[in-house]
Amino acid sequence: GQNIDQPTEMTATEGAIVQINCTYQTSGFNGLFWYQQHAGEAPTFLSYNVLDGLEEKGRFSSFLSRSKGYSYLLLKELQMKDSASYLCAVMDSNYQLIWGAGTKLIIKP
Amino acid sequence: GAVVSQHPSRVICKSGTSVKIECRSLDFQATTMFWYRQFPKQSLMLMATSNEGSKATYEQGVEKDKFLINHASLTLSTLTVTSAHPEDSSFYICSARLARGNNEQFFGPGTRLTVL
C-alpha cells in the first residue's frame, strides 16, 4: 500500500530552526509537495521537489532523497505565525496526491 | 495567479436537505479538479477527482449518489451533498490542477458544513 509518515506534533522556539521529516512509500513518484495549513483554512503551497537535493525558498527549505524515500522541510528563524500544520504529499504514478497526516508545529516564545 | 474560489465558505443546514458547494478556478482553466474532506485534526481525504466533461472518479468508500459532482466547464466544479446528515459535517476543500509544470494543486479556501 501507499504510505506517508510524518511526526504528529513538534514544538520549537521562536527564532530557532526546526526540521520536519517525511518518509514515503508510494506506487511511483512524480514529485513531493509540502503544504502549510493553518487551523480552519485550506492548505497553501510551500515547496515542490522532484529531483534529489535541497530547494531553498527564503526561510523555508525542502530536501528530497528519492532512493531513501525521504524528505524534510526546514524552517529557519521561526516566527509565531509559523504555528500551523505542515502536510507532506507525494504525487504517485497516476498523478494523484497521497497525503501524510500532517505535523502540527507549535512555536513557543 | 492560479486562484481558486469556493462558495459558500460556511453553511449550516438541517438534516435531510441538500447542499451545493461551488469551486471555481478564477484565472486559469482546470481540466481536473479534486474534492477533499477533512475532519478535525485529520489529514485531507480525497473524495473524488472531477474531470471536465466526464463523470467524476470516486474514491473507495465515497457514495457517488450522495456526493454528486458536476464539472460542466473548465472553470467550475460543483459538489452537492444530498440528504445531508450530521455525520456529513466536515470541512470540504476543492483544488484545481494546472495542466502544466509540476501539476501543482491550488486549493480553494474550503467550505465548513454543519448539519444539524
Image (cartoon, coloured by chain):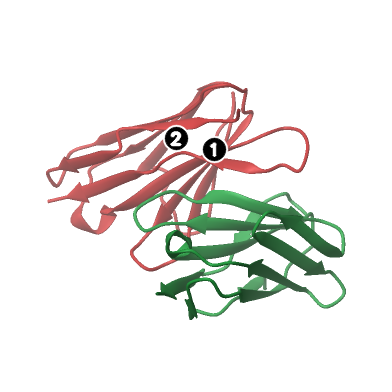
Chain colours: A green, B red
- The quadrant of the rendering that contains the C terminus of chain A is bottom left
Query: Residue flagged by tag 1: what amino acid is it?
Result: Ala
Tag 2 subunit? B
| Residue under pointer 2 | B69
Q: Nearer the viewer, residue B1 or A25?
A: B1
Q: As rendered, which of B108 and B19 lies closer to the eye?
A: B108
Mark 1 element type:
loop
Q: Which residue is mark 1?
A: B56
- Out of B16 and B7, give the one closest to the viewer: B7
Q: Is residue A58 above or below residue B73?
A: below
Instruction: Answer few, some or many: residues within 10 Å of disc 2's Cα (few below 14, many 20 plus, some between 14 and 19).
Output: many
Q: Is residue A13 above or below residue A74?
A: below
Decide if residue B109 is on the left or right side of residue A70: left
Q: Residues within 10 Å of mark 1 (few under 14, many from 20)?
A: many
Mark 2 touching mark 1, by CB under 8 A?
Answer: yes
Instruction: Give the side of residue B78 with respect to residue A59, left or right.
Output: left
Q: Please give the name of the residue rendered at 47% of the width and 56% of the height, measured from the top-left corner.
A: A37
Q: What residue do we see at 72% from left, 42% from top?
A: B103
- The vertical placement of B82 against A90, above or below, is above
Q: Chain of mark 1?
A: B
Residue positioned 34% across, 51% down in the render: B91
Distance from Cα at disc 2 to Cα at disc 1: 6 Å
